[in-house]
Image (tube, helix red, strand yellow):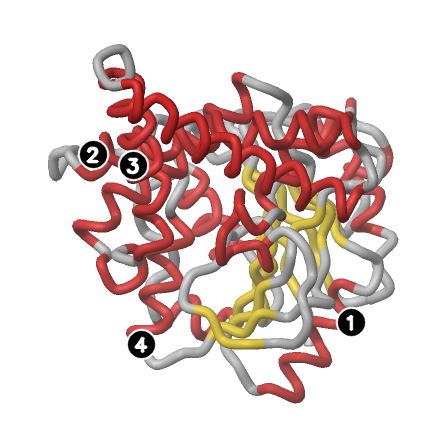
Amino acid sequence: MGFSIIVPVKEINAYIHESVPITLNLDYDDFEIIILPNDPVAIEALPAYLRDPKVRIIASGRVSPAIKRDMGAKASRYDHLAFLDDDAYPRRDWLKVAETTFAVQKVAAIGGPGVTPTDSSLGEQASGLFYESIIGGGGLTYRYRPVTGSFFVDDYPTVNLIVSKAAFETVGGFDNEYWPGEDTKFCLDLVNAGFKILYVPDLVVWHHRRKLLVPHLKQVGGYGRHRGYFVRIFPQTSRRITYFVPSIFALGNLAALMLSPFFTFIFKLWMVGLSVYLLASMVDIFVRTRSFILGILTSLVTFCSHMTYGLMFIRGLASNSHFRSQLR
């Protein structure tokens, strides 16, 4: 069994210089790394690890990550496609875990958690903890930290998604312009075609988080906008209460803000509810990190993130049929 690791990028960046040497050191032999930047690069000027026989760099033009992944799949030499984001790098046993899982489970695709690197800055830790926490990530915390046991999923991010090439070709690949959100449509295509996607907690990659606060909120807002839009066009996996809760939260806060000057009891009720929300978030983070600073910071990040996601979700829900992502 062999794996083609496909990494869409805008350009050869610092993350690539970090991840490629680590990936080349995987405890596995049969794999290649296909990197797809927008523009051609001068191979002879690159460091030795980017000129390794296992590495191929294919200029894609200025297209979406979904199209880049399709191009990488078309150029691949192996029977399994391992999709990885440029700001992520795998644990050394990544492909061994994948090989064992495919041999035992007989599934078409597997996904694993994208864990915040241990040496991340305080802000990046808070960004990661938002996704990992029960209050922040809701029912999707398994995507960001390992949980107990494997289970089937119908929607999984491409930061750490491995699929058989045969299944990929059967559904026609990603074949869309969505970003973020291309993974939602692709996974739905797999499920509708009768394939299964298995969550594997030991299939670990390390995934850098966005810096606070604007880059983080920009990413969260993008997720919310696309999910709101997908509620209309892909209701099978997007019309779920989990995705609506931040919008209810955001609208409730805005309504309380506007009504509080006129109704004292609404202001008091709002303050009590908001205090419970922030305190619960702080306690959750403190119990896991033993850090008051991270507890306070993450609770504030969580509030801003839920407000941003909730409002952008509504914007996506109201978008017209020509809605498409903006290229990076």
Residue in the picture at 72% in, 80% down: 100
Quarter the N terminus occupies: bottom right
Mark 2 Cα-neighbour bin, 10 Å: few <14, some 14–19, many ≥20: few
* Closer to viewer: mark 1 or mark 2: 2
How far apart are labels 3 and 2 at the CA level? 13 Å
State whether residue 30 is above or below residue 241. Answer: below
Mark 1 Cα-neighbour bin, 10 Å: few <14, some 14–19, many ≥20: some
* Closer to viewer: mark 3 or mark 2: 3
How far apart are labels 1 and 3 at the CA level? 38 Å
Identified by mark 2, the residue type is Phe
- Local secondary structure at mark 2: loop
State whether residue 46 is above or below residue 163. Answer: above
How far apart are labels 1 and 2 at the CA level? 40 Å
* Closer to viewer: mark 1 or mark 3: 3
Along the horizontal axis of the image, is 98 left or right of 213? right
- Local secondary structure at mark 4: loop
- Local secondary structure at mark 3: helix
Q: Nearer the viewer, residue 128 or 186?
A: 128
Residue 96: mark in rendering: 1
Residue in the picture at 37% in, 31% down: 269
Earlier in the chain: of badge 1 and badge 2, it is 1
Residue under numbered circle 2: 323
Residue under numbered circle 3: 313
Earlier in the chain: of badge 3 and badge 2, it is 3
